[in-house]
Protein backbone atom coordinates (compact mmCIF):
# COMPACT_ATOMS: atom_id res chain seq x y z
CA UNK A 1 0.00 0.00 0.00
CA UNK A 2 2.81 2.38 0.86
CA UNK A 3 4.37 1.57 -2.48
CA UNK A 4 1.13 2.50 -4.20
CA UNK A 5 1.01 5.73 -2.24
CA UNK A 6 4.58 6.60 -2.99
CA UNK A 7 4.38 5.88 -6.66
CA UNK A 8 2.65 9.03 -7.89
CA UNK A 9 4.93 11.22 -5.84
CA UNK A 10 8.03 9.56 -7.18
CA UNK A 11 6.64 9.89 -10.66
CA UNK A 12 6.04 13.57 -10.06
CA UNK A 13 9.57 14.13 -8.84
CA UNK A 14 11.13 12.20 -11.69
CA UNK A 15 8.92 14.00 -14.19
CA UNK A 16 10.18 17.27 -12.79
CA UNK A 17 13.74 16.01 -13.02
CA UNK A 18 13.19 14.88 -16.59
CA UNK A 19 11.72 18.26 -17.43
CA UNK A 20 14.68 20.04 -15.85
CA UNK A 21 17.06 17.81 -17.78
CA UNK A 22 15.19 18.59 -20.99
CA UNK A 23 15.36 22.31 -20.26
CA UNK A 24 19.08 22.05 -19.61
CA UNK A 25 19.58 20.06 -22.81
CA UNK A 26 17.54 22.59 -24.74
CA UNK A 27 19.54 25.43 -23.25
CA UNK A 28 22.83 23.73 -24.13
CA UNK A 29 21.51 22.93 -27.58
CA UNK A 30 20.67 26.58 -28.17
CA UNK A 31 24.14 27.60 -27.00
CA UNK A 32 25.64 25.14 -29.49
CA UNK A 33 23.29 26.37 -32.19
CA UNK A 34 24.01 30.06 -31.46
CA UNK A 35 27.75 29.46 -31.36
CA UNK A 36 27.75 27.55 -34.66
CA UNK A 37 25.30 29.93 -36.34
CA UNK A 38 27.25 33.01 -35.24
CA UNK A 39 30.52 31.48 -36.42
CA UNK A 40 28.93 30.65 -39.76
CA UNK A 41 27.69 34.24 -40.10
CA UNK A 42 31.16 35.59 -39.26
CA UNK A 43 32.78 33.26 -41.80
CA UNK A 44 30.11 34.04 -44.40
CA UNK A 45 31.67 37.48 -44.84
CA UNK A 46 35.37 36.56 -44.81
CA UNK A 47 36.61 39.93 -46.02
CA UNK A 48 34.81 42.19 -43.55
CA UNK A 49 35.36 39.70 -40.72
CA UNK A 50 39.08 39.53 -41.49
CA UNK A 51 39.18 43.31 -41.47
CA UNK A 52 37.52 43.40 -38.04
CA UNK A 53 39.95 40.77 -36.79
CA UNK A 54 42.89 42.75 -38.12
CA UNK A 55 41.75 45.99 -36.50
CA UNK A 56 41.24 44.22 -33.17
CA UNK A 57 44.50 42.33 -33.65
CA UNK A 58 46.51 45.53 -34.13
CA UNK A 59 44.82 47.22 -31.18
CA UNK A 60 45.61 44.23 -28.95
CA UNK A 61 49.07 43.59 -30.39
CA UNK A 62 50.39 47.04 -29.45
CA UNK A 63 50.05 46.72 -25.66
CA UNK A 64 50.98 43.03 -25.86
CA UNK A 65 54.18 43.81 -27.79
CA UNK A 66 55.08 46.61 -25.38
CA UNK A 67 54.55 44.27 -22.45
CA UNK A 68 56.83 41.72 -24.09
CA UNK A 69 59.44 44.46 -24.66
CA UNK A 70 59.23 45.48 -21.00
CA UNK A 71 59.56 41.87 -19.87
CA UNK A 72 62.69 41.58 -21.98
CA UNK A 73 64.09 44.81 -20.58
CA UNK A 74 63.43 43.55 -17.06
CA UNK A 75 65.10 40.22 -17.84
CA UNK A 76 68.09 42.19 -19.07
CA UNK A 77 68.24 44.56 -16.08
CA UNK A 78 67.76 41.71 -13.59
CA UNK A 79 71.21 40.50 -14.58
CA UNK A 80 72.67 43.76 -13.25
CA UNK A 81 70.29 44.13 -10.41
CA UNK A 82 71.55 42.00 -7.53
CA UNK A 83 75.30 42.60 -7.21
CA UNK A 84 75.20 46.27 -6.36
CA UNK A 85 78.70 46.78 -5.14
CA UNK A 86 79.99 48.89 -2.28
CA UNK A 87 83.44 50.32 -2.61
CA UNK A 88 84.97 51.09 0.79
CA UNK A 89 87.87 53.56 0.53
CA UNK A 90 89.85 53.14 3.75
CA UNK A 91 91.46 56.01 5.65
CA UNK A 92 95.15 56.57 5.00
CA UNK A 93 95.88 55.80 8.64
CA UNK A 94 94.63 52.25 8.39
CA UNK A 95 97.46 49.76 8.03
CA UNK A 96 97.39 46.76 5.71
CA UNK A 97 96.93 44.41 8.69
CA UNK A 98 94.01 46.44 10.01
CA UNK A 99 92.52 46.46 6.54
CA UNK A 100 92.75 42.70 6.33
CA UNK A 101 91.22 42.38 9.82
CA UNK A 102 88.32 44.55 8.66
CA UNK A 103 87.96 42.38 5.56
CA UNK A 104 87.82 39.24 7.71
CA UNK A 105 85.23 40.87 10.03
CA UNK A 106 83.03 41.94 7.14
CA UNK A 107 83.35 38.51 5.56
CA UNK A 108 81.72 37.04 8.72
CA UNK A 109 78.59 39.12 8.32
CA UNK A 110 75.44 37.41 7.09
CA UNK A 111 74.34 40.19 4.77
CA UNK A 112 77.58 40.17 2.83
CA UNK A 113 78.38 37.69 0.15
CA UNK A 114 81.95 38.58 -0.66
CA UNK A 115 84.67 41.03 0.32
CA UNK A 116 87.66 41.58 -1.93
CA UNK A 117 90.68 43.48 -0.62
CA UNK A 118 92.52 45.61 -3.16
CA UNK A 119 95.64 47.04 -1.59
CA UNK A 120 96.77 50.50 -2.58
CA UNK A 121 99.88 49.05 -4.26
CA UNK A 122 97.86 46.55 -6.26
CA UNK A 123 95.44 49.31 -7.22
CA UNK A 124 98.28 51.53 -8.40
CA UNK A 125 99.83 48.72 -10.41
CA UNK A 126 96.52 47.94 -12.02
CA UNK A 127 95.82 51.61 -12.73
CA UNK A 128 99.21 52.22 -14.31
CA UNK A 129 98.89 49.10 -16.42
CA UNK A 130 95.42 49.93 -17.67
CA UNK A 131 95.62 53.72 -17.97
CA UNK A 132 98.90 54.00 -19.84
CA UNK A 133 100.04 56.71 -17.41
CA UNK A 134 102.76 54.47 -15.98
CA UNK A 135 105.48 57.05 -16.67
CA UNK A 136 103.55 59.84 -14.99
CA UNK A 137 102.67 57.70 -12.02
CA UNK A 138 106.32 56.70 -11.56
CA UNK A 139 107.16 60.36 -10.95
CA UNK A 140 104.79 60.55 -7.97
CA UNK A 141 106.48 60.57 -4.61
CA UNK A 142 103.91 58.45 -2.93
CA UNK A 143 100.97 56.32 -3.87
CA UNK A 144 97.88 58.57 -3.81
CA UNK A 145 95.44 55.67 -3.84
CA UNK A 146 93.80 54.33 -0.68
CA UNK A 147 93.27 50.70 0.19
CA UNK A 148 89.90 49.52 -1.07
CA UNK A 149 87.50 46.84 0.05
CA UNK A 150 85.00 45.76 -2.62
CA UNK A 151 81.93 44.51 -0.77
CA UNK A 152 79.30 42.44 -2.56
CA UNK A 153 76.18 42.37 -0.39
CA UNK A 154 73.57 39.64 -0.59
CA UNK A 155 70.72 40.63 -2.94
CA UNK A 156 68.01 42.83 -1.51
CA UNK A 157 67.97 46.58 -1.92
CA UNK A 158 66.97 47.50 1.68
CA UNK A 159 69.83 45.53 3.20
CA UNK A 160 72.30 47.31 0.94
CA UNK A 161 71.10 50.72 2.03
CA UNK A 162 71.31 49.72 5.71
CA UNK A 163 74.78 48.33 5.21
CA UNK A 164 75.76 51.54 3.44
CA UNK A 165 74.63 53.65 6.40
CA UNK A 166 76.41 51.42 8.91
CA UNK A 167 79.72 51.33 7.07
CA UNK A 168 79.69 55.07 6.52
CA UNK A 169 79.89 55.51 10.29
CA UNK A 170 82.99 53.37 10.63
CA UNK A 171 86.04 55.59 11.41
CA UNK A 172 88.38 53.27 9.53
CA UNK A 173 86.51 53.95 6.34
CA UNK A 174 87.05 57.27 4.63
CA UNK A 175 84.33 56.94 2.03
CA UNK A 176 81.68 54.48 0.95
CA UNK A 177 80.57 54.57 -2.66
CA UNK A 178 77.38 52.80 -3.47
CA UNK A 179 76.76 52.80 -7.19
CA UNK A 180 72.99 52.38 -7.03
CA UNK A 181 71.80 55.65 -8.46
CA UNK A 182 71.81 54.51 -12.06
CA UNK A 183 70.02 51.32 -11.02
CA UNK A 184 67.33 53.33 -9.29
CA UNK A 185 66.99 55.50 -12.35
CA UNK A 186 66.62 52.41 -14.49
CA UNK A 187 64.03 50.93 -12.16
CA UNK A 188 62.09 54.18 -12.07
CA UNK A 189 62.25 54.35 -15.84
CA UNK A 190 60.92 50.80 -16.03
CA UNK A 191 58.08 51.67 -13.66
CA UNK A 192 57.27 54.71 -15.76
CA UNK A 193 57.29 52.58 -18.90
CA UNK A 194 54.97 50.08 -17.25
CA UNK A 195 52.58 52.91 -16.39
CA UNK A 196 52.71 54.18 -19.96
CA UNK A 197 52.02 50.68 -21.30
CA UNK A 198 49.17 50.29 -18.81
CA UNK A 199 47.62 53.60 -19.84
CA UNK A 200 48.09 52.89 -23.54
CA UNK A 201 46.76 49.38 -23.06
CA UNK A 202 43.66 50.64 -21.24
CA UNK A 203 42.92 53.12 -24.01
CA UNK A 204 43.38 50.49 -26.71
CA UNK A 205 41.32 47.95 -24.79
CA UNK A 206 38.53 50.50 -24.48
CA UNK A 207 38.91 51.04 -28.23
CA UNK A 208 38.57 47.31 -28.85
CA UNK A 209 35.40 47.14 -26.76
CA UNK A 210 33.90 50.14 -28.59
CA UNK A 211 34.83 48.80 -32.04
CA UNK A 212 33.22 45.49 -31.19
CA UNK A 213 30.22 47.20 -29.68
CA UNK A 214 29.71 49.08 -32.91
CA UNK A 215 30.17 45.96 -35.04
CA UNK A 216 27.60 44.13 -32.94
CA UNK A 217 25.26 47.11 -33.08
CA UNK A 218 25.33 46.90 -36.88
CA UNK A 219 24.68 43.16 -36.68
CA UNK A 220 21.70 43.84 -34.42
CA UNK A 221 20.33 46.49 -36.80
CA UNK A 222 20.61 44.16 -39.76
CA UNK A 223 18.62 41.49 -37.93
CA UNK A 224 16.02 43.80 -36.46
CA UNK A 225 13.01 42.09 -38.02
CA UNK A 226 14.22 38.70 -36.89
CA UNK A 227 14.53 39.97 -33.33
CA UNK A 228 10.97 41.32 -33.45
CA UNK A 229 9.66 37.95 -34.65
CA UNK A 230 11.59 36.06 -31.98
CA UNK A 231 10.21 38.36 -29.30
CA UNK A 232 6.68 37.94 -30.70
CA UNK A 233 6.81 34.17 -30.40
CA UNK A 234 8.13 34.30 -26.85
CA UNK A 235 11.91 34.50 -27.09
CA UNK A 236 13.41 35.88 -23.89
CA UNK A 237 16.02 38.63 -23.91
CA UNK A 238 18.66 36.04 -23.06
CA UNK A 239 17.61 34.01 -26.10
CA UNK A 240 17.84 37.02 -28.39
CA UNK A 241 21.12 38.10 -26.83
CA UNK A 242 22.91 34.77 -27.17
CA UNK A 243 23.83 34.74 -30.87
CA UNK A 244 25.14 38.31 -30.65
CA UNK A 245 27.28 37.51 -27.63
CA UNK A 246 28.76 34.60 -29.55
CA UNK A 247 29.37 36.88 -32.53
CA UNK A 248 31.31 39.20 -30.22
CA UNK A 249 33.19 36.23 -28.79
CA UNK A 250 34.24 35.03 -32.26
CA UNK A 251 35.37 38.49 -33.32
CA UNK A 252 37.33 38.88 -30.07
CA UNK A 253 38.93 35.43 -30.26
CA UNK A 254 39.93 36.04 -33.87
CA UNK A 255 41.33 39.46 -32.93
CA UNK A 256 43.32 37.92 -30.06
CA UNK A 257 44.71 35.24 -32.37
CA UNK A 258 45.69 37.91 -34.92
CA UNK A 259 47.38 39.91 -32.16
CA UNK A 260 49.37 36.84 -31.03
CA UNK A 261 50.44 36.28 -34.64
CA UNK A 262 51.49 39.91 -35.05
CA UNK A 263 53.56 39.83 -31.85
CA UNK A 264 55.19 36.55 -32.89
CA UNK A 265 55.97 38.01 -36.32
CA UNK A 266 57.50 41.14 -34.79
CA UNK A 267 59.67 39.04 -32.44
CA UNK A 268 60.78 36.83 -35.31
CA UNK A 269 61.66 39.94 -37.27
CA UNK A 270 63.71 41.47 -34.40
CA UNK A 271 65.09 38.26 -32.87
CA UNK A 272 68.14 37.91 -35.17
CA UNK A 273 69.50 41.46 -34.83
CA UNK A 274 68.91 41.45 -31.05
CA UNK A 275 70.87 38.21 -30.65
CA UNK A 276 73.73 39.61 -32.75
CA UNK A 277 73.74 42.82 -30.73
CA UNK A 278 73.81 40.82 -27.49
CA UNK A 279 76.72 38.78 -28.82
CA UNK A 280 78.64 41.98 -29.47
CA UNK A 281 78.22 42.79 -25.77
CA UNK A 282 79.38 39.25 -24.85
CA UNK A 283 75.88 38.43 -23.65
CA UNK A 284 73.89 35.32 -24.35
CA UNK A 285 70.65 37.30 -24.07
CA UNK A 286 67.79 36.06 -26.24
CA UNK A 287 64.56 37.93 -26.97
CA UNK A 288 61.71 36.31 -25.02
CA UNK A 289 58.26 36.02 -26.64
CA UNK A 290 54.69 35.53 -25.50
CA UNK A 291 55.07 31.76 -25.35
CA UNK A 292 52.16 29.41 -25.81
CA UNK A 293 50.46 30.41 -22.55
CA UNK A 294 50.90 34.10 -23.30
CA UNK A 295 49.41 33.65 -26.77
CA UNK A 296 46.50 31.67 -25.37
CA UNK A 297 45.99 34.40 -22.77
CA UNK A 298 45.89 36.98 -25.52
CA UNK A 299 43.23 34.95 -27.35
CA UNK A 300 41.32 34.59 -24.07
CA UNK A 301 41.55 38.32 -23.37
CA UNK A 302 40.39 39.00 -26.93
CA UNK A 303 37.43 36.71 -26.38
CA UNK A 304 36.51 38.37 -23.09
CA UNK A 305 36.75 41.84 -24.66
CA UNK A 306 34.60 40.60 -27.51
CA UNK A 307 31.98 39.44 -25.04
CA UNK A 308 32.20 42.75 -23.20
CA UNK A 309 31.75 44.75 -26.40
CA UNK A 310 28.84 42.58 -27.49
CA UNK A 311 27.25 42.91 -24.06
CA UNK A 312 27.56 46.67 -24.25
CA UNK A 313 25.84 46.80 -27.63
CA UNK A 314 23.21 44.24 -26.74
CA UNK A 315 22.31 45.90 -23.44
CA UNK A 316 21.85 49.23 -25.20
CA UNK A 317 20.09 48.22 -28.38
CA UNK A 318 18.10 45.01 -27.85
CA UNK A 319 15.81 46.62 -25.29
CA UNK A 320 14.81 49.22 -27.85
CA UNK A 321 13.71 46.62 -30.37
CA UNK A 322 10.24 45.49 -29.40
CA UNK A 323 7.19 44.42 -31.38
CA UNK A 324 5.07 47.39 -32.48
CA UNK B 1 -9.94 31.41 -20.79
CA UNK B 2 -9.69 35.05 -21.85
CA UNK B 3 -11.49 37.66 -19.76
CA UNK B 4 -11.63 41.42 -20.35
CA UNK B 5 -13.00 43.37 -17.41
CA UNK B 6 -13.87 47.00 -18.28
CA UNK B 7 -10.69 47.40 -20.27
CA UNK B 8 -9.78 50.73 -21.86
CA UNK B 9 -6.73 51.59 -23.86
CA UNK B 10 -5.79 55.16 -24.56
CA UNK B 11 -2.66 55.81 -26.58
CA UNK B 12 -0.19 58.50 -25.62
CA UNK B 13 -1.42 60.83 -28.34
CA UNK B 14 -4.89 60.77 -26.76
CA UNK B 15 -6.69 58.44 -29.14
CA UNK B 16 -8.89 55.99 -27.21
CA UNK B 17 -8.54 52.66 -29.05
CA UNK B 18 -10.68 50.63 -26.67
CA UNK B 19 -13.24 51.77 -24.09
CA UNK B 20 -14.86 49.76 -21.34
CA UNK B 21 -14.47 46.36 -23.01
CA UNK B 22 -15.89 43.47 -20.98
CA UNK B 23 -15.98 40.05 -22.56
CA UNK B 24 -15.43 36.43 -21.53
CA UNK B 25 -14.16 33.76 -23.91
CA UNK B 26 -14.46 30.13 -22.75
CA UNK B 27 -11.77 27.54 -23.31
CA UNK B 28 -13.55 25.51 -26.00
CA UNK B 29 -14.73 28.55 -27.94
CA UNK B 30 -13.83 29.87 -31.35
CA UNK B 31 -14.64 33.57 -31.52
CA UNK B 32 -14.45 36.09 -34.34
CA UNK B 33 -13.60 39.70 -33.71
CA UNK B 34 -14.78 42.09 -36.38
CA UNK B 35 -15.23 45.78 -37.08
CA UNK B 36 -13.96 48.38 -39.52
CA UNK B 37 -10.24 49.06 -39.60
CA UNK B 38 -9.19 51.20 -36.66
CA UNK B 39 -12.05 49.89 -34.50
CA UNK B 40 -9.58 48.35 -32.05
CA UNK B 41 -9.32 44.70 -33.19
CA UNK B 42 -5.54 44.71 -33.28
CA UNK B 43 -5.29 46.60 -30.00
CA UNK B 44 -7.41 43.96 -28.31
CA UNK B 45 -5.13 41.18 -29.57
CA UNK B 46 -2.04 43.17 -28.60
CA UNK B 47 -3.36 43.50 -25.05
CA UNK B 48 -3.68 39.70 -24.84
CA UNK B 49 -0.12 39.28 -26.12
CA UNK B 50 1.19 41.99 -23.79
CA UNK B 51 2.56 44.07 -26.64
CA UNK B 52 0.45 46.78 -25.04
CA UNK B 53 -0.89 47.24 -21.55
CA UNK B 54 -4.38 48.54 -20.79
CA UNK B 55 -4.87 52.06 -19.46
CA UNK B 56 -7.72 50.85 -17.22
CA UNK B 57 -9.32 47.50 -16.43
CA UNK B 58 -8.00 43.97 -16.22
CA UNK B 59 -7.13 41.29 -18.75
CA UNK B 60 -7.06 37.73 -17.42
CA UNK B 61 -5.62 35.01 -19.65
CA UNK B 62 -5.64 31.35 -18.61
CA UNK B 63 -6.25 32.36 -14.98
CA UNK B 64 -3.39 34.87 -14.93
CA UNK B 65 -4.03 38.58 -14.38
CA UNK B 66 -1.77 40.17 -16.97
CA UNK B 67 -1.23 43.22 -14.76
CA UNK B 68 0.80 40.89 -12.54
CA UNK B 69 3.03 39.71 -15.39
CA UNK B 70 6.19 41.78 -15.33
CA UNK B 71 8.54 42.62 -18.14
CA UNK B 72 10.50 39.41 -17.50
CA UNK B 73 7.38 37.26 -17.54
CA UNK B 74 6.28 38.39 -21.01
CA UNK B 75 8.28 35.80 -23.02
CA UNK B 76 6.85 32.94 -20.94
CA UNK B 77 3.34 34.38 -21.35
CA UNK B 78 3.74 34.64 -25.12
CA UNK B 79 4.94 31.04 -25.33
CA UNK B 80 1.51 29.93 -24.16
CA UNK B 81 -0.17 31.76 -27.03
CA UNK B 82 0.09 30.90 -30.71
CA UNK B 83 -0.24 33.91 -32.97
CA UNK B 84 -0.91 34.13 -36.70
CA UNK B 85 -0.05 37.51 -38.20
CA UNK B 86 -1.54 39.15 -41.26
CA UNK B 87 1.91 39.81 -42.69
CA UNK B 88 3.08 36.32 -41.62
CA UNK B 89 6.20 37.60 -39.77
CA UNK B 90 8.34 34.79 -41.15
CA UNK B 91 12.13 34.80 -41.15
CA UNK B 92 13.04 35.02 -44.80
CA UNK B 93 16.62 33.83 -44.45
CA UNK B 94 15.52 30.51 -42.93
CA UNK B 95 13.67 27.63 -44.47
CA UNK B 96 10.15 26.52 -43.61
CA UNK B 97 11.32 23.91 -41.12
CA UNK B 98 13.45 26.41 -39.15
CA UNK B 99 10.65 28.97 -39.16
CA UNK B 100 8.16 26.52 -37.71
CA UNK B 101 10.74 25.17 -35.25
CA UNK B 102 11.45 28.62 -33.76
CA UNK B 103 8.94 28.46 -30.85
CA UNK B 104 10.22 24.98 -29.93
CA UNK B 105 13.85 26.11 -30.03
CA UNK B 106 12.89 29.04 -27.80
CA UNK B 107 11.08 26.73 -25.40
CA UNK B 108 14.17 24.53 -25.28
CA UNK B 109 12.83 21.34 -26.80
CA UNK B 110 15.19 18.55 -27.63
CA UNK B 111 16.39 18.11 -31.22
CA UNK B 112 14.47 14.94 -32.09
CA UNK B 113 11.29 16.17 -30.45
CA UNK B 114 11.52 19.37 -32.50
CA UNK B 115 11.77 17.38 -35.72
CA UNK B 116 8.77 15.28 -34.81
CA UNK B 117 6.55 18.18 -33.78
CA UNK B 118 7.51 20.41 -36.71
CA UNK B 119 6.69 17.66 -39.19
CA UNK B 120 3.38 16.99 -37.44
CA UNK B 121 2.48 20.70 -37.65
CA UNK B 122 3.56 20.97 -41.31
CA UNK B 123 1.57 17.82 -42.09
CA UNK B 124 -1.51 19.40 -40.50
CA UNK B 125 -1.28 22.48 -42.77
CA UNK B 126 -0.36 20.37 -45.81
CA UNK B 127 3.18 21.66 -46.29
CA UNK B 128 5.23 18.62 -45.31
CA UNK B 129 6.83 18.50 -48.76
CA UNK B 130 8.02 22.12 -48.48
CA UNK B 131 10.01 21.88 -45.25
CA UNK B 132 13.32 22.72 -46.97
CA UNK B 133 11.86 25.57 -49.04
CA UNK B 134 12.60 29.22 -48.31
CA UNK B 135 9.50 31.35 -47.55
CA UNK B 136 10.03 33.61 -50.60
CA UNK B 137 9.48 30.64 -52.91
CA UNK B 138 6.02 30.03 -51.40
CA UNK B 139 2.69 31.57 -52.38
CA UNK B 140 0.82 33.90 -49.99
CA UNK B 141 -1.48 31.12 -48.87
CA UNK B 142 1.43 28.78 -48.25
CA UNK B 143 3.28 31.45 -46.28
CA UNK B 144 0.17 31.94 -44.16
CA UNK B 145 0.00 28.22 -43.52
CA UNK B 146 3.66 28.24 -42.44
CA UNK B 147 2.67 30.99 -40.01
CA UNK B 148 -0.19 28.83 -38.71
CA UNK B 149 2.10 25.82 -38.34
CA UNK B 150 4.49 27.98 -36.32
CA UNK B 151 1.62 29.25 -34.16
CA UNK B 152 0.41 25.78 -33.22
CA UNK B 153 3.65 23.78 -33.17
CA UNK B 154 4.23 24.29 -29.44
CA UNK B 155 0.59 23.25 -28.77
CA UNK B 156 -0.50 26.51 -27.15
CA UNK B 157 -3.80 26.65 -25.29
CA UNK B 158 -4.75 29.87 -27.05
CA UNK B 159 -4.53 30.73 -30.73
CA UNK B 160 -4.83 34.33 -31.90
CA UNK B 161 -5.04 35.40 -35.53
CA UNK B 162 -4.95 38.95 -36.90
CA UNK B 163 -6.59 39.09 -40.35
CA UNK B 164 -5.27 35.64 -41.25
CA UNK B 165 -7.11 35.65 -44.59
CA UNK B 166 -6.41 39.29 -45.39
CA UNK B 167 -4.58 38.71 -48.66
CA UNK B 168 -6.09 35.39 -49.69
CA UNK B 169 -8.78 34.48 -52.21
CA UNK B 170 -12.11 33.11 -50.88
CA UNK B 171 -11.26 29.45 -51.49
CA UNK B 172 -7.94 29.67 -49.65
CA UNK B 173 -9.59 31.73 -46.90
CA UNK B 174 -12.19 29.01 -46.33
CA UNK B 175 -9.42 26.40 -46.11
CA UNK B 176 -7.54 28.45 -43.53
CA UNK B 177 -10.72 28.86 -41.47
CA UNK B 178 -11.26 25.10 -41.56
CA UNK B 179 -7.78 24.68 -40.12
CA UNK B 180 -8.66 27.01 -37.24
CA UNK B 181 -11.89 25.10 -36.63
CA UNK B 182 -9.90 21.87 -36.44
CA UNK B 183 -7.71 23.34 -33.71
CA UNK B 184 -10.75 24.63 -31.87
CA UNK B 185 -12.21 21.13 -31.86
CA UNK B 186 -9.17 19.75 -30.02
CA UNK B 187 -9.64 22.24 -27.18
CA UNK B 188 -7.63 25.25 -28.28
CA UNK B 189 -9.24 28.63 -27.58
CA UNK B 190 -9.30 30.47 -30.91
CA UNK B 191 -9.78 34.22 -31.37
CA UNK B 192 -9.67 35.54 -34.93
CA UNK B 193 -9.76 39.20 -35.91
CA UNK B 194 -11.20 39.56 -39.40
CA UNK B 195 -13.21 42.06 -41.37
CA UNK B 196 -14.28 39.43 -43.90
CA UNK B 197 -17.91 39.39 -42.71
CA UNK B 198 -19.11 37.28 -45.60
CA UNK B 199 -16.73 34.52 -44.64
CA UNK B 200 -17.15 34.58 -40.87
CA UNK B 201 -20.93 34.85 -40.84
CA UNK B 202 -21.09 31.58 -42.78
CA UNK B 203 -19.21 29.86 -39.96
CA UNK B 204 -21.36 29.35 -36.90
CA UNK B 205 -19.31 30.92 -34.12
CA UNK B 206 -19.67 33.83 -31.77
CA UNK B 207 -18.85 37.19 -33.38
CA UNK B 208 -17.68 40.19 -31.36
CA UNK B 209 -18.14 43.48 -33.20
CA UNK B 210 -16.08 46.53 -32.31
CA UNK B 211 -17.13 50.03 -33.30
CA UNK B 212 -14.91 52.97 -32.35
CA UNK B 213 -13.36 50.97 -29.55
CA UNK B 214 -16.66 49.71 -28.07
CA UNK B 215 -18.23 46.29 -28.25
CA UNK B 216 -21.61 46.46 -29.98
CA UNK B 217 -22.72 42.90 -30.63
CA UNK B 218 -21.68 40.44 -27.96
CA UNK B 219 -23.56 37.45 -29.37
CA UNK B 220 -23.54 35.50 -32.61
Image (cartoon, coloured by chain):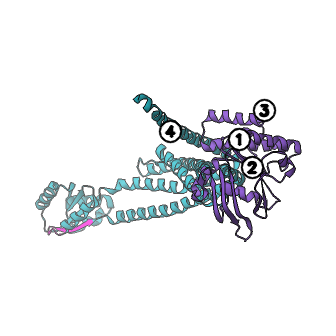
**Camera-side mark, 2 or 3:** 2
Q: CA distance from mark 4 to mark 2?
A: 35 Å
Outermost residue toward the bottom in this view: B14
Q: Was residue A53 drawn as part of the magenta stretch in this picture?
A: no
Image mark 3: chain: B
Res. B31 mark: 2
State which region is magenta.
Answer: A169-177
**Height in image: A147 above or below A266?**
below
Of the numbered discs 2 and 3, the one sitting upstream in the chain is 2
Q: CA distance from mark 4 to mark 1?
A: 27 Å
Q: Are marks 4 and 1 on the same chain?
A: no
Q: Which residue is mark 4?
A: A16
**Height in image: A137 above or below B75?**
below
Q: Residues within 10 Å of mark 4 (few under 14, many from 20)?
A: few
Find residue B99 and report its image quarter.
top right
Secondary structure under tag 3 reads helix
Q: Colour of chain B?
A: purple
**Camera-side mark, 4 or 1:** 4
Secondary structure under tag 1 reads helix
* Relative image position of residue B139 (x, y in whole percent): 84, 42
**Height in image: A322 above or below B109?**
below
Q: In terms of depth relative to the viewer, which is nearer, A237 or B49?
A: B49
Image mark 4: chain: A
Q: CA distance from mark 2 to mark 3?
A: 31 Å
User: What is the letter of the cyan chain?
Assistant: A
Res. B100 mark: 1
Amino acid sequence: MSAAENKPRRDGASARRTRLRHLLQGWLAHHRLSAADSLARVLDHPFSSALTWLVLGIALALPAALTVALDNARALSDRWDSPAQLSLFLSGSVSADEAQALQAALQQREDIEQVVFVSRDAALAEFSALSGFADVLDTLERNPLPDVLLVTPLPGSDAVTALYAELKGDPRIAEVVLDMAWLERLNTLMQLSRRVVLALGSVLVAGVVLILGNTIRLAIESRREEIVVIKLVGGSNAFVRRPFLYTGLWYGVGGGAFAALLVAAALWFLGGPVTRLAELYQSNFRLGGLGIMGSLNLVLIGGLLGLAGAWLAVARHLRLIAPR
Amino acid sequence: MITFDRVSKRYAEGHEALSEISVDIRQDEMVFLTGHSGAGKSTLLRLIMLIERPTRGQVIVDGVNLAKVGERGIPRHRRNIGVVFQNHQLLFDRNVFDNVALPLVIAGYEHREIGRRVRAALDKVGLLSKERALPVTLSGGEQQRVGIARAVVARPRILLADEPTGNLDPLLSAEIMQLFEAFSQVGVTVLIASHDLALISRLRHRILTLRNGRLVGAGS
